[in-house]
Image (cartoon, rainbow, N blue to C red):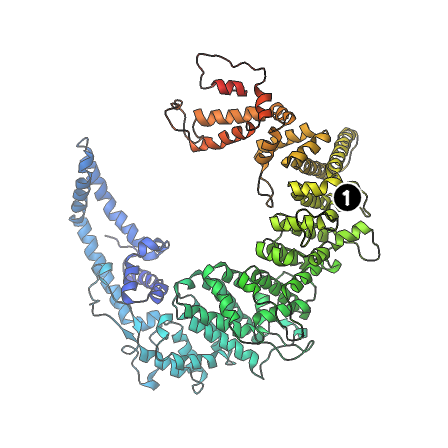
Amino acid sequence: MAMRGLEGEDLKRGLHELIVSWENIIREAGSLEAAEDTLLHLEENDENFHKHDFVRALKRKLEECLSPLIDDELDKYSTTGHIDSGSHETLVNQIIDHIIQSKQYGDMKRKLGRNMNEAVDNLLTNFDREFGIGRVIGAAEGIDPRKTPFVTDDEEVSSFNSLYDQGSVMLFNQDYLKGIADNLSKSKNPSTRREAMQKLNQIISGDIHNKHWPVLRKNLMDVMSDSDDQLSELSLKFVAKSFTCTSHHTSQVYILLMEFLCRQFTTTNAAIPLVKNGLDCANKTMAKFLKAFRLMVEFQQEAPNYWVRYPLAYLEEVVESSLNLLALQTSSHFPNTKLCPLHFVAVLDPKAQWFIKWMVESALRYCLDFSASRKTSYDGASEISEALSKVSLVPADSGKRLYFSGPELEYALFVHSLSFLGRLLCFEKGRSFFPMRLKEKQVPVNIKQLLKALVLLIVDPGTSTTGASRRTDKNIYESSYLVAEVFKSLCSTEALCSASVCKDDIMNALLSPVAQLLDGATDGPIPSEAMLLHVADILCVIASSTTGRRHLIHGEGKGLLSRTKSSAAHLIAEFTKKALSDKLSPPCPSAVTGAYLYVCRQLYNTCEGLLVLSQYELHTCIAQTWRKLQDSEKGTSSAASSTKGDDSEKYKDSYNMFSWKDTLQDNLLNFASTAKGILLLQQTGAFNECVRYMYSRYDKKLQVSKCEKFGYGYMVTQVAATAPGIQALESTGYIRALLSELWSSLECVPQDTPVFTPKTWPVDPVDRSSQKHFIRLVNILSAFPAVYELIRGEALPARESYGLRDVPETITVGISV
């Protein structure tokens, strides 16, 4: 019987590969019992279990040997005819017993057992050479590597009749770890230290934290600081391997890494370059620092996934050691400032993802309490705040390079600081850090001053690319785009928006580009399209909340009954009206006009907003612009057939015109959100066209904007409450579509269920999927004008029976059914 892959060197090679794959499982196991349990259920939990050579060879041999036996047994029982379902289990047991007692299975089992015993005995005899962990601290120490480093359980390993009979797992004793710790001392020669470091990298991470850890920790610190490249590389490899373990002792290794980095920045002979000289990643020392900081950043990003299972002391140790490093500052003044830890972190993680992940976990909000309790004069948050005042607005290249100039390092630190502060201010305890005193300023910086500085970065003409459109790429590092994104996230925080953002001086600074265009000032640079779009996006977020919308309408500290023209709403409405009428110099692009028109739309969607903006007659301006586009579209379509040119340019122009026309019609339709708005919409003469547009959006199932809370269903109810509105809805086919959907939902059940017979009604309860269609129909008929217009003069049809396909097309037919 051929045993291909299950005998000789092939079997030994397959077993060696399988055992080596267990390394991480054994290292992460907290005890011998846990390791045994994991190995016993390896086939269930390891998706790569069947990819091992030994497992594939064993599976192939079992199929080769047992498949004919199983087929014979099945053929034998299949000739007996019908088998009761109750006897299936007994039949399966009988087939299994016959196969196990067969001669073929017995021969295969005995031969495989002999081959396995020989292979396992050979691996145990040559264990040191096969697995490379037996060459320990050497004969000079007088330690026998076969007896000292390992301990095994009491089970006999000579019999290998079954894989599940083995309970042997090798563990390291403390004396072996003491020998490694001693060999890492400075007094040892480099080769001995390298060999000891290699052996340390093969120990389970959880086993190194015992009574010898203080000595090992001290010597590891010396190894990490050693000038020998191979030795320091092995030490970083040890840190990386320890971070893959989920033991709560991992925090000790993280603290070791933080103290090593702190020592590099606090010693007088440290080779830390100046900021103006840049960062050369090809330099060996800088490459070593970057590797260490990368381990730090990766640990910070992964730790929140599991550290909630550990005690609070674990969190305190990680946060304390991290702040100790990030709080380090150089004493020299610019331009002789040296690189600080935040520069390295900013290069590796410019968007501060580590801090964002920390704040995502609710348990990690404790970080803010713990950080606030620190009594240091300048902590990491103050260092990050200070970076905003040193920013050099030079966009950094996103490509992979080996050298970063001084301005690029400062810009990376600015981006990191911006993301950090943006996340910090989203939480109440984070805002408690302010006012914050900086080391070079006598007056502390409060939240209001910080927000005003962010606004100035947005409206600064030097921060936006001229003519740039709205950006959506998450990896873009343009300063105005980044600041605008952070500011929008702050405005979406209700508490911060009402307490700090909704202030007249901040709003005046934000609207300064709009005021400049309205005044026609030419003494300065003209605001770019990108800048105006950033301001409009921020205003949209502010107007989406009740507090922000009232501030835009009435101003700071004003009540609902106040009548002032100094509020932001008046400035925005006047700018939008002039932009629609082409009375601005230079004219605004349609994207900018549409963005500010959307801000006005969020205001006139409400009664108080419409009361303030009604004097600007935006509905008339929108309708006139929309009709001009319709006329120009007709002229363009007639002229296009007689002219030849670039088809792509024509298509682009026609698409932009069509999109702009839909935008205008959509904003005009939104006047129907209020009763007075419906009256204004009727006065424009475009009421029926807007209702048809609303039905087309309903038919296409289009979604509303992210800044809107309600869809078009609310406007349908408002429109249906008027006689002209319900007539327009009926003429578009909206009522017929609602009746058709309701009938299909009641009679034909959901679409994913095959229909054979109609449901029995009214015995069967109404399906929940039909309730939405009922509510839509009830909302339309909730006002008397709608009911009157739909059933006035209509006689109820009388029929003896209705078929499944007799779908009602009018309200009267639906009532009679």
Q: Residue at x 41, y 70 (%)?
A: 313
In this view, the residue in front, 407 or 317, is 317
Q: Which residue is mark 1?
A: 579
Q: Amino acid at mark 1?
A: Ala
Residue 530, image x and y in percent?
Answer: 71, 52
In this view, the residue in front, 96 or 243, is 243
Residue 736, image x and y in percent?
Answer: 55, 23
Circle 1 Cα neighbour tier, 10 Å, few/some/many (<14 / 14–19 / ≥20): many
Q: Is residue 551 above or below residue 22?
A: above
Q: Please, which residue is most extreme toward the front here?
A: 561
In this view, the residue in front, 12 or 460, is 460
Q: Residue at x 41, y 25 (%)?
A: 755
Q: How many numbered tags mark residues here?
A: 1
Q: Is residue 283 above or below residue 415?
A: below
Judge from the rendering whether residue 16 lies leftward or rightward of residue 157; answer left or right.
right
Judge from the rendering whether residue 251 lies leftward or rightward of residue 121; answer left or right.
right
Q: Residue at x 16, y 46 (%)?
A: 97
Q: Is residue 381 above or below residue 229?
A: above
Helix, strand or loop status at disc 1: helix
Residue 352, image x and y in percent?
Answer: 56, 63
Q: Is residue 477 visible?
A: yes
Judge from the rendering whether residue 577 lies leftward or rightward of residue 715; answer left or right.
right
- On the image, which quarter does residue 673 sit in? top right
- On the image, which quarter does residue 785 sit in? top right
